[in-house]
Each structure stands twice: as structure tokens, then as C-alpha cells.
Image (spheres, rainbow, N blue to C red):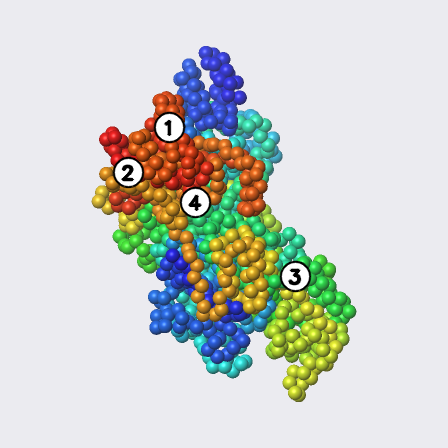
Amino acid sequence: MAIETLVLGAGQEVGKSCVVVNINGKRIMFDCGMHMGVSDHRRYPNFSLISPTGDFDTALSCIIITHLYCINTLFLRFHYFLIIKISHSLILYSYIFFFGIICDSHLDHLGALVYFTEVCGFHGPIYMTYPTKALAPLMLEDYRKVLVERRGEEEQFNSDHIAECMKKVIAVDLRQTIQVDKDLQIRAYYAGHFTLFEYLTLILKVLGAAMFHAKVGDSEMVYTGDYNMTPDRHLGAAQIDRLRLDLLITESTYGTTIRDSKYAREREFLDAVHKCVSAGGKVLIPTFGLGRAQELCILMDDYWERMNLKVPIYFSAGLTKQANVYYKMLINWTSQKIKDSYPTNNAFDFKNVCKYERSVLDTPGPCVLFASPGMISGGLSLEVFKRWAPFENTLVALPGYCLPGTVGHVLMSKPPKIELDPNTKIDVRCQVHQLAFSPHTDSKGIMDLIKFLSPKHVILVHGEKPKMVSLKEKIHSEMGIPCYHPANNETVSVPSTVYVKAQASDAFMERCLKPNFKLHKCSSQELSIKTLTDKNIVPELQVINEKAVFIVEDKSKKLKVVHNDEVLVMLGEKKTED
Amino acid sequence: MLHSLFSILELYSASTLSSSFITLLLMMIRRTPLLSSSEKITLLYLHHRSELHSQAKKKWNVSSLLSLSQARETFGKKTANVIPARFLGGKCDFATCLSKGRGSHFPPCHILNLGGIKILLDCPLDLSALTPFSPVTTAFYALPSLEEDKVDANNDVGSMAVPAKRQKIENQPENKTLIFAEPWYKTVMNLHLWNPSFIDVVLISSPMGILGLPFLTQMKGFSAKIYATEVSARLGELVMRDLVSMHKELKQFYGPTETDFPVWLRQEEVEKIPSVLREIILGKDGTELGGLRPLYSEADVNDCVLKIQKLKYAEEVCYNGILVIKAFSSGVEMGSCNWILDSPKGDVGYLSNSSFISSQVAAFDYQSLQGTDALIYSDFSTLNSTEDVEDEENESVQLADKLLMSSHGLVGLYHNAKEDSEEMEKLAFICSCAIESIKGGGSVFIPINQFGIFLQLLEEVSKAIDASAMKVPIYIISSVAEDLLAYLNIVPEWLSRQRQERLFDGEPLFDHVKLLEDKKIHVLPNIHSEKFWMHSREPCIVFCSHWSLRLGPVVHLLQRWHKDPKSLLILEGGVNPQLALLPFKPMAMKVLRCHFQPGIGLHRVRPLLETLQPKTLLFPEEFRSHISFPSEKFCSVLYYAEGETSKVSCKDGSELKIPATLASNFYWNAFKEQEINLARLNGELIIENARYHLLLDNTEKNSNGRTNSVSFRKPELEKLLATFSNFGINASVEHQKMNSESQIQCVIHTADPYKAVIEIGTSSVVITTAGENVASHLYKALDSVLKGN
């Protein structure tokens, strides 16, 4: 039997994440993202490959949305390990994303969902975690507005579509086992993660990364999202160690970079901000309403508290206030630290953060302003930038990656002038600080995970082709695991494990549990050969439990595992004939 | 310890023992965790047989010792039996009902023995046993008069300074009969017959089922793994903390105790307790004395909570690889659950108190309990509530009658709007009563321990107040109220669909968040807080925890309002109001009794069980007269009673999973006459998630070239040698003799083309060669001989 993986999006590219896995007739779609870089039909995955007739209800068992953002959300990190168990095969779909990639790319995983369910017509179940379900409509609506109102594009779906789509969504809790139908079951897990909260406590872990586990009959598969093996090994590891994976599907963005210390980068960032405000300057932090903004806000609020700073912090992002309501209710999805301090000290009641008003722009004196959108691609952040950029004591702190073509990207090269359009030129005298973004999983992380899980096959998606190729080579040479990196619309087929069921007799079980040990001594010569070949250390003395055990197949083709004595009884008649 | 106890008993068996000495002995026996339960019983039994029996019986009301020795018959043997079979998978499963509980505060308690693994289901406290104790206020006023009467010179409280407010008690004679001492708490008596170190797993099904757990976790030798849902554990922790802090007040009042053994437990003091109250605390025949314990400390609570492994609904956890444990929503309280226990021998379901009507919490997930091998039905709420209805007839309390258990019309199994609306009507009625009382200038007092109902009432009452355009403050007084309210707003995953919609709409889950912001409700940690006395305006509405009306703020507020005919007390059903309100007599306050405890409902039990289709059903004896099961629909029904063990035989054999890659390498031997095929297994047996797996054995243990292949027919030597030469093998027989020890009949050596030794025994042939290929070659030759026959 085989597991077929059809890559509809994010094959040898970044964005438009969409993978359809077919095991034993159960087809599951992971993510349903859209590509932001293109505006024609290529924006959406080629759904016709799932079902040429457009009958998606029979073609797909369910859709699982693994995460909402790729921007670095504070803790609502909706990236999961997803284990799918179908018949006897285990697949791990691992998805790692780094934050701040493109402003619009928070719809990488979700963007095409509304289009697929409402326009193409899919009526089956869709699974997301609670935070994803709560925040998805916000993001979708926000994005729809961007598309229609700012870009002036034709509306692909409307607000009603979003509401209708969300009705089909079934929210799942972490570690909850959901029975999709008789055969298929899914489960989401923590995968262990941490973010810049390390800065606050140095030991703190922010959790929220999860994995999904799905099961059809006996086969299991894991879809992993953002994971981090090193800092939180016990959590993530504890959940996946018992899996026997046939396939691991993993994201490979930044597969070749190595992470540096986050703590140092954050301190650098805060120092830069502090230096600027103490010199009476203004700080502009272009960011998005959700995720990264809250993260920085907590970071700065804490810093302000400790340093006893009185400089006001303003927050302009409209989404933020609304989002904070969700954040408060979903605090269980946050780190233990935030959870424990909840009733007395809610991390989201920022003490030093004030509400933004327009008058702030021209008020003299130092201040910090969070303005959306990030990358200074338009809106308030661009407006503020135009005003403040000509002053030398202003600091523009870019908290994330900036796409080529945006002001943010140009700013990174620190030019003296920026030409917005032929008529507008801005003198840039301000300082620029970029908070280096960390790819969530570097090659070490991916390698660690693969080493830990030792799956039979690995498929790489969502990454730049050259990096994928080098990672693939590395996996193949270092671990000897077959590795694939299919392009879009390609299918990879790998064999799956199949189990035969047998009935074990009580006598057999009893004998097995009361072992009859034998000591077996390896000669030192043998030992050295084995150690060389297996890499496993073979103890010189081994305990071996030898028993006469048989498997019996009777006329109805039923298998029975029995003990020696029982076999003799079964064959008793024959014996007497002799 | 044990020996000294024995010697003491022997020494004194002939002489007369003072009752206090017997008491001391009993105390020592009970306090000795080192003794296993059977030993304890033996001790008690010994005591029983002594000449003192009649004296003890008279003085101590210990006729019950007989029943304890019977208990030994019931439990002792099984305790002894379990150990050798532990984890090896016995032929039977055992289920013992330790207590069928009483109401929502005291859930049932069972012990299961699944293939050698002992599982304790819930560990509650019987809070109704607090009733015979005097609340602190009454004690405060009543004690001086007791002292005057010289009833109790030894009482520790005697030295306390007491203000002269004595007139209050003179006309309440019954008040005096309450126990004026630091209360002890009643655990499940039958649980103490089990050695705690033999319990492997503890499952907590509801927040109230956790209250007795610190007693267990602090016992020496206790090492069981404890599982509870996240919310049960958290709410349970809050309730325990509340209990400990409420108890502190009484502790401070009575001062430190001089001895471990309280004065009120002395024979002569116990006799003074009226029989009704004595029965509550000591049980019908006085046996339950052994279950009494002084309260645990806060440190014990912390210690206990740390030991709990927290689960989500429908999460699979695996105990020792052999037992998969899953919790499913029971729809009664936040975090309350039913259990599925899956072992290689089959699965067992535990149906605790459940409800189809759940407007607040996640719906009763009965589908997940379908098709189990055995199902333990343990929802006693229906029975309790019918009993309550009978009790009610004797009650002088008028108002409540029409609220009690309104509908019994047979409706479908599934969620039913009618009952839902009746539930709402009940709440609406309470609200209207509350509003009426407030309009009349009286306060409303609602002591309640059920979180779901509490939140619902809070919302409804505040809505009703808003509707009536009055400005009435609502107080919530509890040491843990702040934590509780904050916590309840962050558990959307555990709530009903309707509540979850609020999350997705971006609203707080419960109204209290907004009410707190608007300062319409006030949360106070205790009654003594300045804020309350400074700002409390009457009429007002006060919520606080129930505690059988004996602990905490409820006592003070009742003391304050019991004489006010305008005020209204809303009392949860399930408690005996006569006794509960005893310290506050005469009651001028209006009392509204409501039955809040939801259950499956008698009329739904049968359809539910028909849907669940367990192969074996364990059903309470008490229900036998209420519900009958047609035999054609159920495989088997076993009735159980408190303190009895039911035996469920489980299926023979377990499932073993073999990977197809391994299975395809089997070398099958066909036996045509028996119509079976036979193959030898070689692999690694592991147990994972309650299933056995046979995996490919990677260790090359046959590196010495010794291969075992066993056949079932004795080969004829001549034929074998002939066949060998046909195969081109040069073989010679070394010796041919009967060796009784090794059962080797002859040994054949082959030299050309391979070197091998073939030992032919009475029931086996062993080929020893240098390589596997050689062995298989020889085996084929041997096989052809055997088949050629």
C-alpha cells in the first residue's frame, strides 16, 4: 500500500501552502493557502487536480488548517505537528514558517479556504484549533478589504462567504482526539515552542506550537507545524516519540541558516529604542495588528516597567484591541508563565501603552508608536514615516522581514533619499534598526527533528529550491532517509506499513511476560564490526528471550499466535497416529 | 508497630480495658498506614473476639465490627489475590463499588481491577457529615452556657474570652447537641480497607471528586498515577483551597488541640450526640468512624495538585503502555467527565453523573462510550433526586415543591428543548423570588457549590435586576472567588456551543466579566473584609460557597439574616434542611429549596443504555426496581451494591499486530488434516498504546549459526539419511541412545558439503550449522522426509 502526497502549493516555492495526502482512500487537505505574489488564477492551488469534476465532497475527507499566521505571533502559534494515522501508515506533516515574511502572507495557509469552500463548493468538515477559528474571520475580513479596497481587485469572496465558511469549521483543542468518521481520527499536539519571552525570564517557554495527529484504521500520520526541538524538547518529544512514521512532510524555509541568539537581538532592539527615546527622539515601529505587535508590546511594557520609563507607547493598529479580547480568553494557549500570572497580572493589560490619537503625530517630545502596516507599504506607517523620517533623532525599528518593493526594504540599505513616486521624495535622516528575524527552524532544527523521529521517508515543501536541494542531500547523506522535494502539482508516492492482526492466546502472553532469559555473549570481534556498521552500541552481553512460539492459520484464514504447548495440543491427533 | 499493638491487645485482653484505651487503639490502627487493610481488619477482628466485646459493643457501639470482618471476606482476599497477577492480564476484571455517594457534593467512588491494574474512580469527601458540627458563630454564642453547665471541663475553648451575648441560645435547646469542636472530615470508609500502595491509577471525574485526594496522596506508599481533566483539577484545587481557608477560621476559634484524638470522639461524648446526627457522622451502625480524618493542610493540597496529570476531553493517555485512558464530557459540570479505559483485553466505560441538559458546559459525549466491553453505570443522581422528592413531603418548606424534578415525560434521548426551557424556568422562578424579596426590602442569600449553576444564576439574577430597574449590589464572597471567576472565563474549550459562539464573536464567555467591570458585582475574599461592611447596602444579593452551611461566610451571613423574615435563602437540594439549619433556629428567613443537580433522568436511562450497547453492563442494585432490561437487547447485566465486588469475565486472548513485512517472511507449514498452517514467529514483542505489536527483531541473535526449526513428526532415521544423500549431503550418525535428560535420541554429523550437527530428540530436531543458508538447506531435506511420510 502507498501514501500519495499531491503538492498543490508550496512545492519548491514559498507561499500558497496546500498539500493533499491520500492514504487508503482517505484524502486530507492540509492548509488551503493562496499566493500573494500573483493576482491571476495561479494565486489559488489547482483544485481541479483533486477532483476534475468539482465534486470535492467525495474527493476529500476533510481539510485541516494548521496555522493562521506566518508572522511571528506572540504565542498563538498555530503551527502544528500533525500526525495522520491511516490504516498502518504514519505520516508526519511538518510545517515550519518563519515570521514576518510578507505582509499579506498570513493567508498563506488559509487564504484560499473561503474560495474553496464557498466558491468551489466543499461541504466537508474543516478543522482548526480554537485560536485559529477565533482569529481567522478577523484576518480574512481584513485581507478581503485589502484586496478589494486598496488594490481595487475584483472580489473573490464577500463577508457572507467568510461567515458561511466559518460555520463549517470545527474547533479542536490540543491533544483532543477527534473522530472525523469511522476510520479517520485526528489530534493536535503541542510541539513545544518558545519566542522572545525568553528575554523576560530566560527560562520561559512559550507554547502553542502543536502537531496534528490523524488516524485512519491503524495508519497514523503527523503534520507538524512550527516546531523547536531544542528549548522545549520534553514537551514536543514526549508527544511524538512513540510514532512509527512512514512519511515526514516538512517545511524547509531557511533550511540552511543557523539561528543566533534571540535574547541578544532583543536586547539590542530595546537598547536602540531606549537610546532614541532618552535622547528625546521618536520611535516608529511599523508592524501588523496581530501577533508580532503584541509580542513587542509585552516586551517593551516590561522593559518600561523595569527601567521606570515614562515615555508613552502608542498603538495604532485597529485590530489590536479586538484581538486582545481573544488573547485574554485564549490565555490557556499561551505560555505557562502568562497563564499562571493570569488573574493577578494579565500580560495583555499593558500599563504603559496608550491609545493612539492623531494629535500624537505632531506632539513634541519622545514617544514610541506602533503603526500598521508593517514594511511601511502604505497606510498610517507610511504617513508617519513621511513626517518623521527627515529628523535625525527619529528611529525606525523594523521588527521583521521586508519584501522587496516596499519602503521598508529600501530603508534597510539606509539610503539618503527615498523616492516614493516621481513626485514624492523623502529625505531620510533617521536611524534605522532592524530586529533580525529568526527563522523558526533552521537546518539544525529540521535535522534534529528528523533524527528524532527517524521516519521512513521525508518530503520537503515550502522553501526555496536551492536550499531544499541542499537540505535534501544532507538528509540523505547523514541519515540515509529517502527524501523528496516535489514541485507544485506533482505527486510523490511512498509505501506504507501494513499490519496483520492476529489473536494471541493467553498462554502465549503469559509466557512472554515471564521471560525465559538467556545470556548471549558477543565476541569482541563481532562487536567491533557491529559498532561500525550499526552505529548502535551493542552490549557485550545480551539478554535474549527465546521461546518456541508459533503462528497458526486456520481454515477461515484467521491468525492465532500460540505457545509451543498449545501447538502440540492442536496437533495432538496427528501425533497419536504416528 | 504491628507487633506492639498485638502484644498490647494480648496483654489486656483478659483485663478490663478503658473505653478510651480502646479508642486509642482504634485510632492507632486507623492511623497506621504501614498496615495493609487486611491486617487492620485482623486487628479489629481480634479486638472483636476479645472478651471486651460486649463491653466495647455497649460502650462503643461497635457491633459493626462484625460487618468489618465480613468486609475482610469481601476485600481482604482480593487484595491478596491481586498481586501475583498484576500486569499479567488476569482472566477477569473486578469492579467494586466503594460508595454510591450522595448528591453532587459526594460523587460515587469505585475501584476497578483491570487485568491486575487497580483503578480508583474518584476520591470524594462526604461534606454532609459536617452537619453535626457547630458552625463557628453558634459555638461562639453557645459555648459559655455549656461551660456553665459544666458539661465539658476539658474543652479547649473554655478559656476563651466570650462577650456576654448569651440570651441567644437559651431557647434553642437543639443547638447544644451539635459538636463544639474542630470538625473532622468524612472520607469514603470502604476506601480505607484497601492498601493505598496497591492502587495504580486514580481517575477524578468531577471537581468534587478530588476533595478526598490529599488524604490519599499523603499516605505512605501511595504512588498511583492520578488523572483528571484540566478544569476538574483546577476547580478542585480551588475548592480545596477554599475548604482549607474556611477551616482555618474554626481552627483559630478552637485553638490548637492537645492530643491527636479529639474529645468529642470519646465514647461518652459520642453517646451524647443525638442519633440522627450520630448516624450522619458515624454511619448507621457506627462503622464509618474509621473514615473520619482531620483536615489536610494547604501544603497537602499543593502536593496533591502537583501529582495530578491533567487531561483534555478525548485525549488519549497511556498508562504503562498497557492501559489507554480517555475522558469524555459528561455535561454536568465544567471538566466533569466519563471515562473509557482501553486495555488489550477489551475496554471498560465508566458513566458517572451525566446530563443531557447542559446549557453551560460541553455537551454529554455519549457517542464515545458506545460499544464498550463493559460499562459501569454510576449516575445515582436520578435516584437521589427521587428520594429527595419523598423527603420533601415532610418538609415545612413550602415554596420549593413545584421546582423539584418537574418533568418525567418520556422523550427522546437527545437534547430536548423542553427540558432546557424547564431548566430556564426554574432559574427564572428563582430570579423572580429573589426580585420579590428585594422589593420587600430583604436580602437574598445563595450558598452554592456548583460552578455551572452559579454562573447561570449570577447572569440571570443580574439580568432580572437590570430589568426591574433596581440598583442592588451583588456580592460574591469566597476566598477563591477572584481566581475562580478569572479562570472560568478562559476555558472556552470546555463550554457548550452557545458559550463558544461568544468566543468567536469576540465577547467574554460569561457576563460576569462585564458585570465586574461595571461594578455591579463585587468579589470579596471573606466576610471580614472592610469593604463588605463599609459598602454593603441591604438589600443585597450574596453568593458564597455552600459547605453544608457550616463553614465560612455562609455561617456569618445566616447568623445575620436568619431572623429577618424579609430575607430569602436559596438552598441547594440534597441536604436535609432541618438539620442544616439547626444552628440558625428559629428561622424567620424564607427558604427556597431547589434541586439543581442534573442527571440522566430515569426515563432516559434505558434508551441511553440501548444506544451505548455495552457487552456487559454493571448496574446499581438500587435501580433494579426502577428499570428493567429486556434480555434480548443486552448481553448481560450485573447488579452491584455498595461494598460488593462484581466480576466481569473478559475475553480470551489479546490482539497482536504483526507488520506485513514480517508476516510475509513466515515460513508456513501446512497441516492438511487439521486444516491449519503453522509458522514460527521470530520478533520483538512490545506493548504500545494498549496493543501488542510484534516487530522485526533487529538484533542478530542467531549469529552463531544456530537456527531453530521445529516440526511435529519424528523423522525416521534411515529415510532421513537416504534423503540427505539424495540432496548430496554426506551424513553420519554419531550415537543413538535414549538420553532421558536432554531427550536426544541421536546425533547426526554432516561433513560434506557443509558441517552441521543434527540432534534428533523425542519432540524436536535441532540443526546446528555455520550459516542460515545451510540450515535452511538441511531443513528442506528434513522437511521433505517429514512430508514424504
Kind of residue indicated by mark 1: Val
Q: Secondary structure at mark 3?
A: helix
| A380 on left or right of B296 | right
- Do the residues marked 1 and 4 share a common chain? yes
Q: Are marks 3 and 1 in contact (CB under 8 Å)?
A: no
Figure quadrant of residue A293: bottom right
Measure the alpha-carbon separation of dots 3 and 2.
81 Å
Judge whether residue B226 can be spotted in this image: no
Residue B695, label in figure: 4
Pointer 3: residues within 10 angstroms few (<14), some, or many (20+)? some
Residue topped by disc 1? B733
Amino acid type at image mark 3? Leu
Q: Nearer the viewer, residue A246 or A328?
A: A246
Mark 2 or mark 4: whose residue is earlier in sequence: 4
Q: Give the spatial CA distance, label 1 vs label 2.
A: 22 Å
Labels 1, 2: front one: 1
User: Which chain does the numbered disc 4 sit on?
Assistant: B
Q: Residue at x 42, y 14 (%)?
A: B51
The first of marks 1 and 4 along the sequence is: 4
Mark pair 3, 1: CA separation: 87 Å
Disc 1 to disc 4, C-alpha distance: 39 Å
Label 2 is found on which chain of the structure? Answer: B
Q: Amino acid at mark 4?
A: Leu
Classify residue A77 as left or right of residue B189.
right
Q: Which residue is mark 3?
A: A299
SS class, disc 1: strand
Label drawn at residue B787: 2
Q: Position of residue B767 (x, y in %)?
A: 40, 34
Say few, some or many: other residues with alpha carbon within 10 Å of mark 1 (under 14 / 14 to 19 / 20 or more). Answer: some
Task: Name the subunit of mark 1.
Answer: B
Q: Classify 10 Å Cα crowding around label 4: few (below 14), some (14-19), many (20 and above).
A: some
In the displayed structure, would residue A11 be above or below residue B526? below
